[in-house]
Amino acid sequence: MTNGNTTTESDTPHYNWTELEKSYILSSYYWGCALAQFPAGYLCKRFGSKAVLFWGTLGSSLLSALTTCSVYAAGWKAYCAIRLLQGLCQVSWPCIHQHLANWCPTAERTRLGAFAYTGFDCGNVLAMYGAGMVASSSLGWPGISYSAAGLGLIWCVLWLLLGANGASEARFIGEAEKSYIVGDLQRSERTEPKKMEIPWRGIFTSVPVYALLCARCADSWGLTTMQTQLPTYLSGVLGLDMKSNAIFSALPFLLMWVMCYVYLIIADVLLHKKWMSLTALRKTYTSIALWAPASIMLTLVFMGKGQQTLVLVLVTLSVGVSSAATIGSELNTIDLSPNHAGILAGLMSSLTNLMALLTPLVVGVLVPDPSQRNQWQVVFSLAAGVLFAGNVIFLVWGTAVTQPWNESKELQRELEPEEKPFQHTKLEITADGSDGSGVSLRLNCTSP
């Protein structure tokens, strides 16, 4: 292909970018994301999640409004620059984790966290379907950017009016609910997180943190493979037109959205009835989210153009079942450290975005001709291997137990005697009576 452009009857330019150029465009967003996540986690602790999330969304919305004129002026390189800057504005991941830690009582953390994350899946459904419909309408592809900008600006206004960093700052909340939330969080944390020193040594030497990182990176690789490359695969291998592409591209994420609620209800019952520990629940759901798509991707390598219906079913299932990762691994940062959930989420998101960055670049190299099924076989096989390995590591070393470095050093020393109540207790068994026929038990306790 050439790097020129053509003009349609509606005077909307259409650009003939190469597959490699498209891969740069798709990955450039994640360059900014990877750089933004760690600073965003720190800023959330410093200024609160409300301000950080507002400015990030506002910047992204304004950049979306500038996308069309930038592409008109400088082509695909300008598009890469816009997407990189938009990636720098994507601070939602650490903000949401810190926001959940500040708002969710311990007993409701899994339920409310999973419910909040359904917003991502809802957004994917609307974006995948809506973008295709807008692009095929008289608005053309520029309409996608303007629509996204308008929705983002509306959200910013609502967030300013309704959002709050915590229950104690919220204006639209009952006193009973406020007392319950604030009281539960004070009992579970015992220390104001903003005043605590960040335990970098504990974080970077924690085996459960690295196990979670492997699971999150694997999930990011698999989901990005399907999310960013699905339209190309459907049009290149299956030959679906633009309007059908929009519908079928949205189907997997619609199932993903619905399954989030199914997983949530099941998890709520399992935890309420105490049929499964939180650690076991996290590992079970992570296994579903990683191993089920891995198996499906291995099956996809044997599918051809004459099996369109079966391919669509498998692709839909692959993306749909992966929503178990919300309860399985995405909320695990709050388990490991409620006080530093934003910092952990920022670190995780920085590295998972590197995986999302690499995925389109790898696919761009492996698939120079998107109509060739054998090239997609390599892509799906690679993704399946990454998903399988990531879950094995999480099964062996992952946990939902709060780590010792979650608390301040002073509080750890204060709690040490309470956490080991029998460390100064000795049970003695001695002979009783002159003939040694009796036995006496003596429990000796000494004050620490």
Image (cartoon, grey):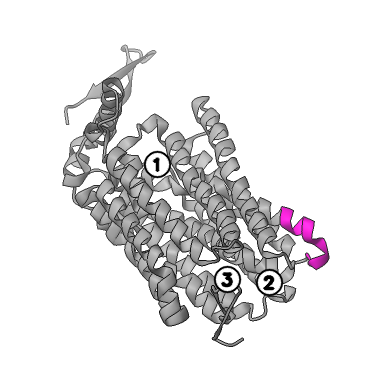
Residue at mark 3 to residue at mark 1: CA–CA distance: 59 Å
Residue 366 occupies which quadrant of the picture? Answer: bottom right
Q: From the viewer's perspective, is 152 left or right of 132? A: left
Disc 3 residue type (three-letter):
Ser
Residue at (43%, 68%) from the top-left corner?
29
Q: From the viewer's perspective, is 356 left or right of 263? A: left
Question: x, y (%) of residue 325?
Answer: 52, 48
Quadrant holding the N terminus: bottom right
Q: Which residue is mark 1?
A: 401
What number of labels is visible?
Answer: 3
Quadrant holding the C terminus: top left
Q: Is residue 423 visible?
A: no
Is residue 31 one of those drawn in magenta? Answer: no
Q: From the viewer's perspective, is 49 left or right of 410? A: right
Q: Earlier in the sequence, mark 2 or mark 1?
A: 2
SS under mark 2: helix
Residue in front for this viewpoint, 287 or 130: 130
Q: Which residue is mark 2?
A: 376
Residue in front for this viewpoint, 193 or 398: 193
Is residue 307 one of those drawn in magenta? Answer: yes
Q: Earlier in the sequence, mark 2 or mark 3?
A: 3
Disc 2 residue type (three-letter):
Trp
Question: x, y (%) of residue 384?
Answer: 63, 63
Q: Is residue 69 above or below residue 38?
A: below
Frontmost of labels 3 and 1 is 3
Dominant secondary structure (helix, strand or loop) of the stretch shown in magenta: helix
The segment highlighted magenta reads: 303-313
Disc 1 residue type (three-letter):
Val
Q: Earlier in the sequence, mark 3 or mark 1?
A: 3
Frontmost of labels 2 and 1 is 2
